[in-house]
Image (cartoon, rainbow, N blue to C red):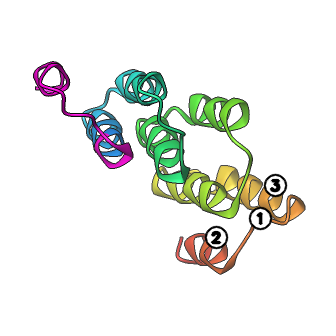
C-alpha cells in the first residue's frame, strides 16, 4: 500500500512513519523499523522524538538492547523523552540493571525527569 500511496502522490508524514516503525517492531522486525526510519529521512522528514523512540522501542522490545543503545547513541541528541524510552523498554524486558544504568546516564546528562523516575519506580 505504501508504494501505491506514494505513486498516487500521497506524501506520508512523520505520524505515518512512526506507525510503520511501531508495527514493524511489534511484528518482531526491528530491522524493518530502522528501514522505515531511513525511508522517512529519504522523504525529507526531519526525525523527531517519536520517530527515534519508535525505532529504539522496536529494538528494545525485541530483546536487542545493544542495537537500541547503538541507534540511540549514533542517531540522536539525548533528551528526557528518549532516555525514558530506554528506561521503560529495559523495565518491560525485565532488565532492571540496564534501566538503572540509563537512568544514571540521564541524570548525568540532566535529562531525567519525573516520568523517567516514575517508570523505574513502577518496576
The residue wearing badge 3 is 105
The residue wearing badge 1 is 111
In primary-sequence order, the first of circles 3 and 2 is 3
| Residue at image point 20% right, 24% down | 6
Q: Is residue 14 left or right of residue 59?
A: left
- For disc 3, the neighbor class at 10 Å (few under 14, some 14 to 19, many from 20) is some
Report, in whole angstroms, how far the alpha carbon at label 3 lies from the one at label 2.
Answer: 11 Å
Q: Which mark is residue 98?
A: none
In primary-sequence order, the first of circles 1 and 3 is 3
Across and down, in percent, residue 47 comes to 53, 41
In front: mark 1 or mark 2?
Answer: 1
Q: Quadrant of residue 76?
A: top right
Which quadrant of the figure contains the C terminus? bottom right
Across and down, in percent, residue 97 comes to 69, 53
Is 13 situated above or below 6? Answer: below
Element type at marker 3?
Answer: helix
Is 40 situated above or below 49? Answer: above
Across and down, in percent, residue 83 comes to 66, 56
User: Where are the magenta residues, as a range?
Assistant: 1-16
Which residue reaches farthest front?
A: 9
Across and down, in percent, residue 102 comes to 72, 54
In primary-sequence order, the first of circles 1 and 2 is 1
Q: Is residue 23 left or right of residue 91?
A: left
Report, in whole angstroms, how far the alpha carbon at label 1 lies from the one at label 3.
Answer: 8 Å
The residue wearing badge 2 is 116
Q: Is residue 21 left or right of residue 122?
A: left
Q: Quadrant of residue 34?
A: top left
Amino acid at each position: 500500500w505504501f508504494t501505491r500511496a506514494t505513486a498516487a502522490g500521497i506524501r506520508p508524514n512523520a505520524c505515518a512513519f512512526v506507525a510503520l516503525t511501531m508495527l514493524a517492531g511489534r511484528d518482531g522486525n526491528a530491522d524493518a523499523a530502522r528501514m522505515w526510519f531511513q525511508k522517512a529521512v529519504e522523504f525529507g522528514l526531519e526525525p523527531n522524538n517519536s520517530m527515534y523512540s519508535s525505532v529504539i522501542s522496536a529494538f528494545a522490545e525485541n530483546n536487542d538492547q545493544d542495537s537500541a543503545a547503538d541507534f540511540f547513541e549514533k542517531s540522536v541528541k539525548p533528551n528526557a523523552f528518549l532516555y525514558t524510552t530506554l528506561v521503560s523498554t529495559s523495565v518491560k524486558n525485565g532488565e532492571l540493571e540496564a534501566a538503572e544504568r540509563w537512568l544514571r546516564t540521564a541524570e548525568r546528562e540532566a535529562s531525567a525527569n519525573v516520568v523517567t523516575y516514575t517508570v523505574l519506580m513502577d518496576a
